[in-house]
Image (cartoon, grey):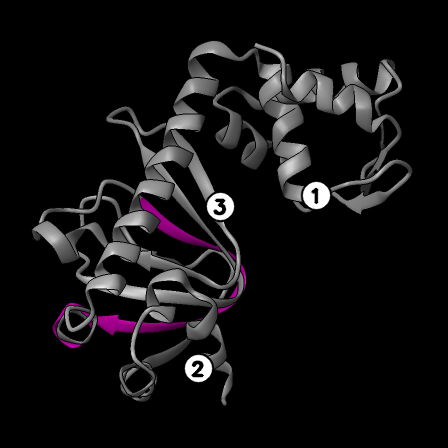
Amino acid sequence: MNKLESVLDNCLSFSKLAVEDRYELASQAVRRTCQKGEFICWQGEIWSKVLVLVSGGLEWSMLSPHGKRQVIFRLEPVRAVWGHSVFDQEPMPASLEVMEDSEIYVWPSEIIVPIMSRNVEAVWAITLELITMMRQVRNVVYGFAFQPVSGRLARLLLDFYHPADGMSAERDLTLEQMANSVGTTKELVSKTLHHFADEGIIEINRMQFVFKDMEGLEELASQD
């Protein structure tokens, strides 16, 4: 079994296909390597494709009419991305950006739709994947509406770094990326991080974070 076939085995919708259909899908995939900062599709574009992320990281983001960028959520490996345009031929509501060098496999809708449509369980699994994505977006919107910046920032640190007490981590996210993720300004992100440091929750230097109080960080992340 090659790497792509293994990934398809572990993706919910593809795992529901018959073995011969998975082999056919794997044989028709187009492999791409993407560099950090590259855009796979743009908000407003008709993007009738599906991809699986094998390695690296991707990020959905939206641009307001005034040009403010807002991160919706990030995608980690062994995730499928179903372009909205596959289903309705309407423009994409968000952009998909490469956050770290990534390996992906891509199919146009005219190849993947007939294969997936042969199996009712696979179609049902696609629906479940899309519902899961909608729930992720709901959590983001809920956070913006009801959670203070400190809580949103604490949640971002937990979700991005997966830290443990005493763990150090390189500062892979810039202040601007953090601000885009939690819906605020770079200045407020910086101020909040230093407040966390004053409270003994984290230590900060130019190169890394050290997580000192996971219980405190979790408490902040859960506040409404």
Task: Identify the residue position indicated by label 3 in the image.
Answer: 74
Q: Earlier in the sequence, mark 2 or mark 1?
A: 2
Kindly report the secondary structure that dominates the magenta region of the rendered protein. strand
Labels in figure, total = 3
Q: CA distance from mark 1 to mark 3?
A: 12 Å
Q: Earlier in the sequence, mark 2 or mark 3?
A: 2
Q: Earlier in the sequence, mark 1 or mark 3?
A: 3
Task: Identify the residue position indicated by label 1 in the image.
Answer: 161
Q: Amino acid at mark 1?
A: Tyr
**Between 101 and 81, the one nearer to me in the picture:** 81
Where is residue 89 drawn, in percent x and y? 8, 53
Task: Identify the residue position indicated by label 2 in the image.
Answer: 5
Where is residue 217 drawn, in percent x and y? 75, 23
Q: Amino acid at mark 2?
A: Glu
Q: CA distance from mark 2 to mark 1?
A: 29 Å
* Front of the two marks 2 and 3: 2
Magenta-tinted stretch = 95-112
Residue at x 82%, y 40% (from the top left corner): 164
